[in-house]
Amino acid sequence: MSPAEQHNNFNTPWLPEIESLLSRLWRDGILAKEIASIINQRFGLSLSKSAITCKVGRMALPPRRGQLDATERSINRRENMRVWRQKNRAAINKYRRERRAFLRSQNSPAFDPAKPRNAGNSPWSPTVMARMGELWARGLTTPAIAQHLNAEFSLKVSERSVQGKARRDMPPRGKILGRSGHFEWTQQQKDRLAALWPGRSSTAIAAIMAAEFDRPFTRNSILGKASKLGLPNKARGGSIAETDPVILAARAERRKAKDRERKRVGPVRHRQQKYQKKIELRRIAPEIEDFSIPTPQRKSLIELGEHDCRWPVGEPKSSSFFFCGAIAEESRPYCSAHCRRAYIETRPR
């Protein structure tokens, strides 16, 4: 077997003569591309530059100039900087003296050795820091903390400055909130969640509890705590518990009736009939003008229930914004009139 055939076998390692030649060429400073060309010509192979560099790494050959690791480069950089400062110490001191004289002549506030850095411009007074500590302990986010501080003390601190100050001077969240770094739910909050759970969405519950307890609640936190408390799952399209035997029996009967109808007329005919029935219901649904919706029917985001129409009316930022609030279609977020405007039915195949 020739050296080329033996090397091209994937189960055979590099030949000793190839490795010795590679090691010698590498120590002589030959480029990886030229090493690949020399080995290919001598042994009839088709190695690439990447194959040579990978093999060099596996053979643990010493690095050459320009191939030092990050630690050695950092050490050399610091050493070079130290040598440069020693050689140019006189020029550096001269520049510093001239800079101080210039600042003294301009009466610049930057030159005052007895004055602490940013002593006159720093907004972080002891009162502000104490208030920030209270907001931080309550679990508010950094944008919310910045907004509170700007409103209470007439400041202009940014979210990034609050983040930096929290990293430097505030304890980690985990030491305040517990081992996991999250707030512990009180029994009062758990009872309130259980009371609000039926008939409301998780987003609406989060908004209500955040307003009542002055603490940030999110949709995911509400869902996670409801799962841990074992609250009943909300039925799809409704807020009735899935474990109610009467509801489960009625649903099973409806499914059996649909299955019987599908078997009687066939699956294709059944889909066509269902499509035609839906179209007829949409056709007989009356047209509705958004601003002619009765006032008692209109609802806000928090007032919406599981079966209410969620068609928005008006600008979200205006005080006159509301949702339709009519009875929504089954498995649809809108009522029949607004479904006609929201959906374009496609014919079944």
Image: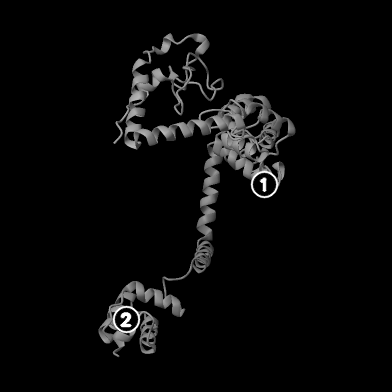
Query: In this rendering, does residue 6 appear at all?
Result: yes
- Is 318 left, or right, of 169 in this rendering? left
Q: Is residue 15 left or right of residue 224?
A: left
Is 255 or 151 nearer to us in this picture? 255
> Nearest the camera: 64 or 45?
45
Hey, what amino acid is under mark 2? Asn
Residue 87 is marked as none
Which quadrant holds the C terminus? top left
Whether residue 141 is visible here, answered yes or no, is no
Tell me the quadrant of the picture where the N terminus can be found.
Answer: bottom left
- Asked if residue 36 is positioned above or below residue 332 in the image, the reply reads below
The amino acid pointed to by label 1 is: Ser
Residue 340 x %, y %? 36, 21
- Horizontally, residue 8 falls left or right of residue 139, namely left
Would you say 255 lies left or right of 239 here?
left
Q: Nearer the viewer, residue 192 or 75?
A: 192
Q: Residue at x 35, y 74 (%)?
A: 51
Q: Where 232 sits versus 174, above or below?
A: above
Q: Which mark, residue 8?
A: 2
Compared to residue 230, the image places residue 192 above or below, namely: above
Of callouts 2 and 1, the N-terminal one: 2
Q: Which residue is at 50% across, 21% downward?
A: 308
Q: Nearer the viewer, residue 32 or 347?
A: 347
Is label 1 in a helix, a strand or a loop? loop
Q: Which mark is residue 180?
A: 1
